[in-house]
Image (tube, grey):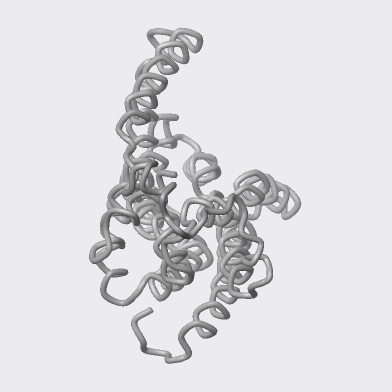
């Protein structure tokens, strides 16, 4: 629902609006990670989680009451066009599956740096403190808040589908190349964390605008939900598969970075079908 609502309210600056909304999830992940680290030592694990659970519940409840759709329920019911819970015609459209599989493969590679960067830092710099080893994670989250909020500016100019392809392509490059080559020192690790944070998570804020570009705003919440279902396999299996690759290669971090980068590149290839099926012109705004 949160992904779909900004597209109901904004048309001209839909990318910026959606990006700003989704950027809130990055800040919501970055700030608590720093706060929790500061609370764990003086309060202990049980009290820290108890306090954080109450804070999380209160903020989610407040957010629930702040959600407002573009059209009131009474107006939606009066519309001639009936909203379907599941529109089966999507499943018969190759463009739908092109976008769906692109999200599937992209998510497999997206989660890997967030799960492994602190372990990678500890192995590359053995004497580093746990606080500094974990610091790249909130740095990624803060950078992703900036990236998600600003990618809409580019998307509003060159098109959402074009932006999606470029974002995933650059994300694959930062992992397969920069993580492999440049992230050997703590400075290099932090630089990678900033660059990947700025680029890697941006595709999430483009999912709904891309869906609008391909299919319009009708039944948008259902379509967005179907698209977001493609995130589940990658979110659940991407990091564990990365762990198997890392252990199976004898702790070869180059193999892990190559896996996460190349599988996102497969996502780019999948998305190209939807792009050129809907808009064959190479340099068109789409």
> Residue 29, located in which quarter of the rendered image?
top left
Q: Nearer the viewer, residue 82 or 46?
A: 82
Figure check: 45 above or below 7 = above
Q: Nearer the viewer, residue 75 or 14?
A: 75
Q: Nearer the viewer, residue 91 or 193?
A: 91
Figure check: 272 above or below 59 = below
Relative image position of residue 89 (x, y in whole percent): 64, 67
Residue lying at the far right in this picture: please name it: 248
Residue at (42% x, 30% y) in the render: 129
Relative image position of residue 285 (x, y in whole percent): 34, 82
Relative image position of residue 19 (x, y in whole percent): 32, 54
Residue at (36% x, 35% y) in the render: 28
From the viewer's perspective, is 176 left or right of 69?
right
> Residue 65, located in which quarter of the rendered image?
top left
Residue at (43% x, 91% y) in the render: 281
Residue lying at the far bottom in this picture: please name it: 281
Q: Nearer the viewer, residue 279 or 88?
A: 88
Figure check: 28 above or below 81 = above
Count of picture labels: 0
Q: Quadrant of the C terminus?
A: bottom left
Relative image position of residue 171 (x, y in whole percent): 46, 64
From the viewer's perspective, is 275 left or right of 167?
right
Q: Quadrant of the N terminus?
A: top left
């Amino acid at each position: 629902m949160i992904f779909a609502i900004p597209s109901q309210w904004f048309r001209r600056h839909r990318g910026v609006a959606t990006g700003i909304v989704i950027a809130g999830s990055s800040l919501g992940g970055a700030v608590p990670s720093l706060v929790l680290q500061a609370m764990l030592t003086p309060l202990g694990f049980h009290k820290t989680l108890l306090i954080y659970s109450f804070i999380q519940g209160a903020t989610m409840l407040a957010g629930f009451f702040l959600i407002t759709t573009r059209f009131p329920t009474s107006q939606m019911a009066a519309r001639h066009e009936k909203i379907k819970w599941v529109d089966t015609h999507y499943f018969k459209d190759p463009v739908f599956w092109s976008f769906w599989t692109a999200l599937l493969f992209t998510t497999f590679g997206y989660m890997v740096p967030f799960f492994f960067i602190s372990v990678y830092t500890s192995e590359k710099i053995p004497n580093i403190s746990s606080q500094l080893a974990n610091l790249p994670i909130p740095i990624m989250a803060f950078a992703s808040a900036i990236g998600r909020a600003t990618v809409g500016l580019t998307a509003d100019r060159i098109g959402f589908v074009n932006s999606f392809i470029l974002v995933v392509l650059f994300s694959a490059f930062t992992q397969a190349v920069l993580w492999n080559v440049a992230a050997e020192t703590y400075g290099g690790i932090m630089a990678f964390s900033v660059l990947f944070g700025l680029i890697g998570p941006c595709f999430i804020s483009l999912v709904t605008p891309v869906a609008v570009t391909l299919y319009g705003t009708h039944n948008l919440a259902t379509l967005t939900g179907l698209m977001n279902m493609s995130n589940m396999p990658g979110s659940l299996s991407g990091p564990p598969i990365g762990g198997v690759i890392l252990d199976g290669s004898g702790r070869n971090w180059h193999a892990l970075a190559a896996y996460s980068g190349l599988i996102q590149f497969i996502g780019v290839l999948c998305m190209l079908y939807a792009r050129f099926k809907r808009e064959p012109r190479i340099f068109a705004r789409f």
